[in-house]
Amino acid sequence: MECPFCSARPGTILYEDELIRILLDSYPASRGHLLVVPRRHVESWWELSEEEKVALIRGMELAMEKLAQVLKPDGFNVGINLGRAAGQTVQHLHLHVIPRREGDCAHPRGGIRKAVLNLEDENLSMKERWIKNRLSGEEVERLRKAFRI
């Protein structure tokens, strides 16, 4: 099976360097949900080199900085699902950067994805939720422009 992060569609890539990529999440939990992934195909944190670990954290900071600049969220959830039992569905390590907004759910606590669901979201199908949370073409272009360093 082809890895969606190793062969990411060009339109989903906002930033890349020799160690990481920052991608738009194809199934966003909130508007602006980004993924920071190592360029090298690895499944777990323990397979990463120290240099790659530092690059992922730097990528997380860069993603939050650009999201704050362009979309102005009120906060962030950041997390990594390590292993199938933890909900990892793509077997290529990836770090979620999920922008949060005041009032986006009644009780903003719990797991990374659960934290952004509210009653309205719970009444939507998964596909409807993902579509609702996708950025507009203009927002994607503003983010893409912000990532040009």
Image (cartoon, rainbow, N blue to C red):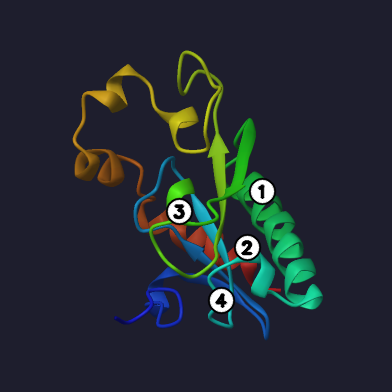
Q: Which residue, as the protein is rendered here, is positioned at the far bottom?
A: 18
Which residue is more in the foreground, 96 or 100? 96
Question: Does residue 87 show up?
Answer: no
- Residue receiving disc 3: 139
Element at label 2: helix
What amino acid is found at the position of numbered circle 1 in the picture? Gln
Image coordinates of residue 133 in percent, x first then y, are 35, 42
- Residue receiving disc 2: 146
Give residue 69's mark: 1
Which residue is more in the foreground, 38 or 103? 38
Horizontally, residue 38 falls left or right of residue 83, namely: right
Query: Which residue is located at x 62 percent, y 38 percent?
Result: 76
Whichever of callouts 1 and 3 sits on the residue coming sooner in the sequence is 1
Query: Disc 1 vs disc 2: Cβ atoms closer than 8 Å?
Result: yes
What amino acid is found at the position of numbered circle 3 in the picture? Glu
Quadrant of the image for the N terminus? bottom left
